[in-house]
Image (cartoon, helix red, strand yellow):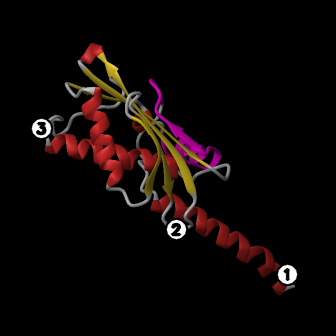
């Protein structure tokens, strides 16, 4: 009887451990809106993260950069991606300010497709950054695609702050 119980218990414990570990390693903003329950459901049920105006997830709203021209922002994006070891540029179109990249996850080396698009925003005399990350396999991504977006935005905004183009605590999401 006990060996039969362990046959079911051990895989279940292993699965729960892997899921919890994957979610924890992505260092996601669990307490931000729309709350941890909605976030957990999303991270388990979707394999795409993309920026969209009005997204209930603040980190998934397009980034607006006043006083940063689209060509300048595109150059910053290229520089940041060039310094990210798990990122490989698959295609780029400088005229359209669009980059297609492949991001490899750290542990299992899953590959996710990332699209970065910089467009002019004449209303703010600047540019807007649209991002989309999609896992190639699986149904839920454990927040990995959101993590890709957060990592890229952190790198971009770090360089813009160093250049004096972004105030210290500026919120660029969904203006």
Give x and y (percent) for residue 42. Answer: 58, 43
- Does residue 121 belong to the magenta stretch? no
Residue found at x 40% / y 38%: 59
- Of the numbered discs in the image, which one, if any, rests on residue 4? 1
Question: Quadrant of the image for the C terminus?
Answer: top left
Residue 45 located left or right of residue 168: right
Q: Can residue 42 be found in the magenta stretch?
A: yes
Circle 2 packing at 10 Å, graded few (<14), some (14-19), many (20+), is: few
Q: How far apart are the two marked residues, 1 and 2, measured between alpha carbons? A: 31 Å
- Relative placement, left or right, of 80 versus 27 is left
Residue located beneath label 3 in the image: 164
The total of numbered circles placed on residues is 3
Residue 116, percent from left and from top: 43, 37
Q: Are marks 1 and 2 in contact (CB under 8 Å)?
A: no
Give me the disc on residue 155.
Answer: none
Residue drawn at x 36%, y 46% as measured from the top left: 152
Say which residue label 2 marks. 107
- Given this view, does label 1 or label 2 mark the residue nearer the observer? 2
Q: Are marks 1 and 3 in contact (CB under 8 Å)?
A: no
Q: Quadrant of residue 125?
A: top left
Q: Residue furthest left?
A: 164
Magenta residues (range): 35-55
Kindly state the secondary structure of the residue where label 3 is placed. loop
Q: Residue at x 34, y 52 (%)?
A: 82
Visible residue check, residue 171: no
Residue lying at the far top of the rendered structure: 123
Q: CA distance from mark 3 to mark 2?
A: 36 Å
Q: Nearer the viewer, mark 1 or mark 3?
A: 3
């Amino acid at each position: 009887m006990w060996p039969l119980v362990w046959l079911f218990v051990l895989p279940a414990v292993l699965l729960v451990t892997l899921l919890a570990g994957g979610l924890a390693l992505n260092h996601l903003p669990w307490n931000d809106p729309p709350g941890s329950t909605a976030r957990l459901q999303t991270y388990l049920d979707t394999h795409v993260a993309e920026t969209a105006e009005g997204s209930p997830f603040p980190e998934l709203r397009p980034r607006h950069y006043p006083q940063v021209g689209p060509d300048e922002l595109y150059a910053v994006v290229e520089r940041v991606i060039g310094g990210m070891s798990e990122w490989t540029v698959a295609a780029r179109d400088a005229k359209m300010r669009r980059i297609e990249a492949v991001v490899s996850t750290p542990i299992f080396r899953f590959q996710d497709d990332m699209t970065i698009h910089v467009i002019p925003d004449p209303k703010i005399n600047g540019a807007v950054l649209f991002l989309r990350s999609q896992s190639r396999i699986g149904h839920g991504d454990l927040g990995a695609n959101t993590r890709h977006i957060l990592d890229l935005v952190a790198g971009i905004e770090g360089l813009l702050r160093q250049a004096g183009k972004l105030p210290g605590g500026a919120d660029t999401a969904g203006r």
